[in-house]
Image (cartoon, coloured by chain):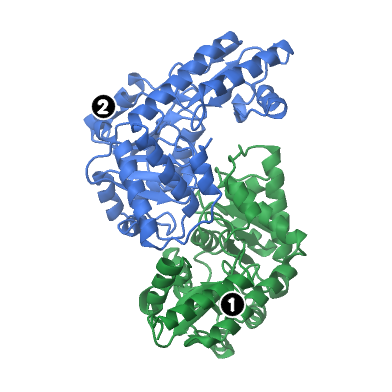
Chain colours: A green, B blue
Amino acid sequence: MSNEAVRAIGGEQVPYFRTPEFSEVMFENERLMLQFAHAPEGSRVCFMTTSGTGSMEAAVMNVLSPADKAIVINGGSFGTRFAELLSLHQIPHHEIKLEYGQPLKEEHLAPLAHQGYTALLVNMGETSTGVLYDMPMISRFCQENGLVLIVDAISTFLADPFDMERLGADVMITGSQKALACPPGVSLIVLSPRALERVDCHHSVSMYLDLKLALKNGERGQTPFTPAVGTLLQINQRLRDIEAAGGVDSELKRMKMLSQDFRQKVTVLPFEMFTVSPQNGVTALHPTTTSAYDIFTVLKDEYQIWVCPNGGDLRDRVFRVGHLGALTIDDNTTLVHAMLDMQKREIIK
Amino acid sequence: MSNEAVRAIGGEQVPYFRTPEFSEVMFENERLMLQFAHAPEGSRVCFMTTSGTGSMEAAVMNVLSPADKAIVINGGSFGTRFAELLSLHQIPHHEIKLEYGQPLKEEHLAPLAHQGYTALLVNMGETSTGVLYDMPMISRFCQENGLVLIVDAISTFLADPFDMERLGADVMITGSQKALACPPGVSLIVLSPRALERVDCHHSVSMYLDLKLALKNGERGQTPFTPAVGTLLQINQRLRDIEAAGGVDSELKRMKMLSQDFRQKVTVLPFEMFTVSPQNGVTALHPTTTSAYDIFTVLKDEYQIWVCPNGGDLRDRVFRVGHLGALTIDDNTTLVHAMLDMQKREIIK
């Protein structure tokens, strides 16, 4: 959900972008992204015209190499994607496979200490199940073992606290369509000085996903190829809106309040929380009496409310309610009322 | 320049896309793209959330392999990009280097007949100089020599006649922001049955640019990763607008009329046409008495009119006037009047 100011930009002509004016917008985007991510001094941002997966692949290709030995946390479909990317790019790795919806624990990591690993990849929020991993615990393990820490924060940035410097994270990836609440089509990669050094040493096997090219053009506030100019202008509006409303801490507070309000209201329905460690941006619910996919379909077709269905094994077990973007307490009430109405109509048993 | 209906979509909330409704939009996009490209029976379209370069690279990576031996026409910066992509992906190739602004001639191709070449890559319009290459001549050469023909039609599709079947072209690439007149962020690849066979045999070294994945998801009207949903809805509007206004032939007629009108009106100024074989979508002009870059700057800052400057060697010699999208005869008049005013003010000598 985008706010009105962001949507208004979407309705305008897209300006030509090889101009000092657009470079200024991009410099401001970089400055605010670094500030909101609490990135260490000397960090940089790449703006990619791709989905989040494009940036996940760019990070794997440009920051890692077959000389690395990586650990990847796999507790859902986005963890699986990181593992597949590591395989495709021939980077040796060990997968920590978690049961869907379950948190990562100290005991999963402990046996991997001092085993020659060089990097760890994690989806801070595994959006497919709504799990928020324990980042301080992961960070301690990485710092003790000198691991490069690559964080997919696509669904958590601006929704759950993230301090890149304190966590010692080297790469943070996010997307335009999650808490940035803009249309999809742009993803963003924040790189620490240590990650930048690695990018500089590696040879990218793709021109389009080459972060060296992106960084070089970024020095003048530009991108190597025509970017999604309109979406980058919308991101600028949204970042400035957050700054004007008190910065990242106010936004995090608002998100926490919004998700807690929903989780409290939804307790009247015969649903279980799918995870004990949920992210603020999404609530994954397991309806104990009705197909999750049927609930998604009826909400869409009869109430014009969109929740997220799951695919594969979880299709009938889990649906997800997003809290990101321009949503309000009233939207929570509307959704819960719709589901109570479905209960009255015996669609939800 | 986007029309009002396309802009209005940009101002709306972007809907969730893993739905039958969005699949229908994508099926219609594919159907109309195949129809407007005159693609042979059995062709398919990939919708990539990338700039045109992303699709150029995807075509090189997925359709060609190091077992090929390619010819690439290089008459400007986009030809150079194709050559760089071939080098990066280790595909043996011969470059036909043309002087900027000059057309390709029979004598450039003749010596390369029967030399074991397997593919030819060309930017049908070399946008950096406005040259339209002689596609029927290139097509004859490719058919006589059994070459796979890969055509970057980013700036020519819907502006200059293109018949994929008659030309025997195997790949046609275009972008959302040229004659499709939508915001940038999506590129499109039309693949002939022969190209599809090649994609099927090759192993892609990038997940994000893997056309096998795109084709497989396309069978159900979807994309492997979150696409630029809003832009794809805008493309749908634009394709349906063209269909409603009489189809691709009417659009081509309109584009030809528009560019000829401008070229006739601009003869009163001390400019030379930079090429003898211009595309309909862009007019590259060489001002004989004034810096081209200064003309671009003054038009932007003092008249709020945007023409395209050139980079590198051509910076002061050439500027380009685009004719793509929702432009009219009146826009031509406005621009020529502005430049006549600059002449009166002795900015143009």
Which of the 4 image quarters holds residue A319? bottom left
Tell me if residue B205 comes above or below residue A90 in the rendering. Answer: above
Q: Residue B206's spot in the image, x, y percent?
A: 43, 57
Residue at mark 2: chain: B
Asked whether A321 or A69 is in front, the reply is A321
Task: Give the residue at x 38% y 58%.
Answer: B21
Viewed as shown, does residue A59 lie left or right of A24? Answer: left
**Callout 2 crowding tier (Cα within 10 Å): few <14, some 14–19, many ≥20:** few
| Host chain of mark 1 | A
What residue is pinned by disc 1? A279
Is residue B110 or residue A184 the one in the foreground? A184
On residue B140, the disc is 2
Residue B294 versus residue A151 in the image, above or below? above
User: Judging from the image, what secondary structure is the residue with disc 2 in?
Assistant: helix
Image mark for residue B220: none
> What is the x, y in percent for residue A154?
57, 66
For label 1, the SS is loop
Q: Amino acid at mark 1?
A: Gln
